[in-house]
Amino acid sequence: MPKILLASPSWTEMYGGYQDAAKRSILYPPYGLTVLASIAKKAGWQPDIFDGELFADSIDAFKAKIRSFSPDIIGITSCTPTFHRTVQMANIAKSEFNLPVLLGGAHATVLYEEILQNHSCFDLTFVGEADLSFAQFLSGNITDKSRWDGIPGLFYKNESGKTVFTGPPRLLENLDEIPIGSRDLLAQDAYRWSLPGTEGRRFTTMNTSRGCPFDCVFCATHTLFGHHIRAQSPERVVNEIIHIYRVEGYSVIGFMDDNFTLGRERILSICEKVIEAKLDIVMDCWTSAASLTPEITQAMRKAGFVRVNIGVESGDPQILKSIKKGVNLEVISRAITSAKQAGLETCGYAILGLPGETRLSAKRTIQFLRKQKDLDYAFLTVAAPLPGSVMYDMAKKGEGGLKLLSDDFSHYKRYAEPVIEVNDLSAKDLANLQRIGHLKIYLMPHRAWRLLRRASIKETWENIIAFAKSVIISY
Ligand code: B12
Ligand code: SF4
């Protein structure tokens, strides 16, 4: 049986000075690769997965994995700030092991032409959603380039050295057809996420829908999955939950959908079915405030959700409008309160340095987050214009007061090293506002007290030390 190694580069380095604090609480599994591995199995391949994030020296570990697994082909995923690592891995696979290398993921989906021009280590790029193209590619002779032409969603150089794009990929119409990911290929106890009451429990992620109807200018999700929402049926979602709980022993699940709670009937039905199945599980999800009504938050709490992560983006009404968030501050506040009243932990994410940002609007964001008495956690990131987002084009053209300081994607981190200036805010100002903002937010007595009560004394000290270290390093 031919073998394929699917690989993901290490990524917590993109937290910059906040890496220590991030590593303590976040380690997500490469969900997309588990799905691709199941697709490969169905096509008659033996897959394995390499997750660079699990190793102190991910490059050495990658070489060791290639030696021990001895694949016929390698597939690597790509994200903008870690693309240099993807290239490093592809170069090793090609020059040291002489293996064909496939590329896929968010970064490659936008910049495939430029990538193939500059990096000869990649043989073939899968553009966009790849479930169907990958299955079709693996189901025949993979070295026969004349076949590639008939598979939509591929970019490559043909026999005569000419680049070929076979057109946009076909999208899955029925997401119930996505196979359950091969999580057995992961180091199953290695992953973690700081939800309450989850110590010693096995954590994994799921993704149950694709596409987002909103148009936030900083977001690149549409290039992968489009605007139209496609979602798995409640039956399919709950079957996967039951499977990973009963067969694989996972009892902590993070739903990584862009907007998990969009679609009232679907989410209510999922909650109802989870309750009926009587599972001892803890869950959280990411979503837009637009859909968080009391009816939904209460149903979620009953089903075992313990936290909801909400995109706040900005505390300035004008910025919220101009970035096309699709919700206003009132809706966001109401959603936070509704989640809190239902008994869920609440976490808000905001971005400094969005188009149109000024010192005043950034201060409004910090102030808004500080004052939300029902918000347990809040994180401020600094905007990095991601290829595939409207903001990327704006930054390149200097629109919205933006000035792009670097085209080196390895600097496109969310914490501490901004690659933009905007209006009256220099890169240094943005990093300072981020640091001071976090201090101001977490030193609010109601928030500090709640967090102290939630954590053990040991955990609290460890968190304080990691956070203090992050603040000092990022200074
Ligand atoms: C969950 C998630 C995370 C998680 C988990 C990541 C992980 N280890 O899986 C965490 C929080 C850690 C994370 C971190 C980051 N993420 Co993220 N993340 C997501 C999210 C919401 C879902 C990912 C997912 O599971 N999708 C479902 C699976 C099935 O899709 P997939 O992995 O993309 O794979 C499909 C195709 O892309 C393709 N494919 C992918 N890789 C490969 C490889 C091969 C060989 C082939 C053939 C095909 C292929 O096939 C798959 C099936 O169709 C997406 C948005 C989205 N809706 O996808 C953003 C997203 C991918 N993240 C994004 C970003 C920018 C980041 C961060 C930089 C942080 C940030 N938000 O600023 C870091 C960098 C991480 C890294 N690896 O470099 C951007 C990427 C944009 C870009 N230009 O790079 C996205 C699109 C969100 C956005 N707002 O724009 N992320
Ligand atoms: S940030 Fe969230 S709500 Fe906005 S477009 Fe992206 S996925 Fe959709």
Image (spheres, rainbow, N blue to C red):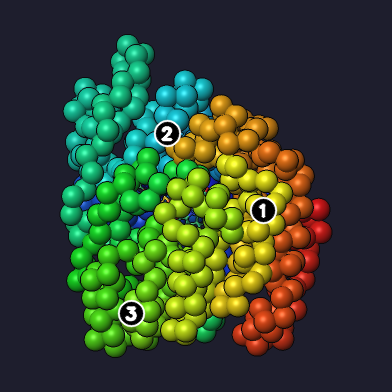
Could you tell me which secondary element the residue under label 1 belongs to? helix
Q: In this view, does 198 lie above or below 92?
A: below
Q: Residues within 10 Å of mark 3 (few under 14, many from 20)?
A: few
Could you tell me which secondary element the residue under label 3 belongs to? helix
Which amino acid does the dot numbered 3 rest on?
Glu
Closest to the observer: 366 or 376? Answer: 366
Q: Is any atom of residue 135 visible in this view?
A: no
- For label 2, the residue is 110
- Extreme residue in the top direction: 160
Q: Is residue 196 above or below residue 66?
A: below
Mark 2 in CB contact with mark 3 (< 8 angstroms): no
Between the C-alphas of marks 1 and 2, the distance is 30 Å
Which amino acid does the dot numbered 1 rest on?
Ala
Question: Of callouts 2 and 3, which one flags the residue occurring earlier in the amino acid sequence?
Answer: 2
In the picture, residue 402 is in which quadrant? top right
- For label 1, the residue is 362
Q: Residue at x 22, y 56 (%)?
A: 175
Q: Which residue is drawn at 67% across and 53% down?
A: 362
Between the C-alphas of marks 1 and 3, the distance is 33 Å
Q: In this view, does 313 lie to the left or right of 263?
A: right
**Residue 309: numbered disc:** none
Q: Which residue is drawn at 63% across and 45% down?
A: 357
Q: How crowded is mark 1: few (under 14 residues within 10 Å), some or many (20 or more)?
A: many
Q: Could you tell me residue 18's position as x and y percent?
A: 69, 58
Mark 1 in CB contact with mark 2 (< 8 angstroms): no
Q: In this view, does 28 lie to the left or right of 18?
A: left
Some atom of ligand 1 lies within 8 Å of the CB belonging to the residue at label 2: yes
Which amino acid does the dot numbered 2 rest on?
Val
Q: Residues within 10 Å of mark 2 (few under 14, many from 20)?
A: many
- For label 3, the residue is 295
Question: Of callouts 1 and 2, which one flags the residue occurring earlier in the amino acid sequence?
Answer: 2
Question: Of callouts 1 and 3, which one flags the residue occurring earlier in the amino acid sequence?
Answer: 3
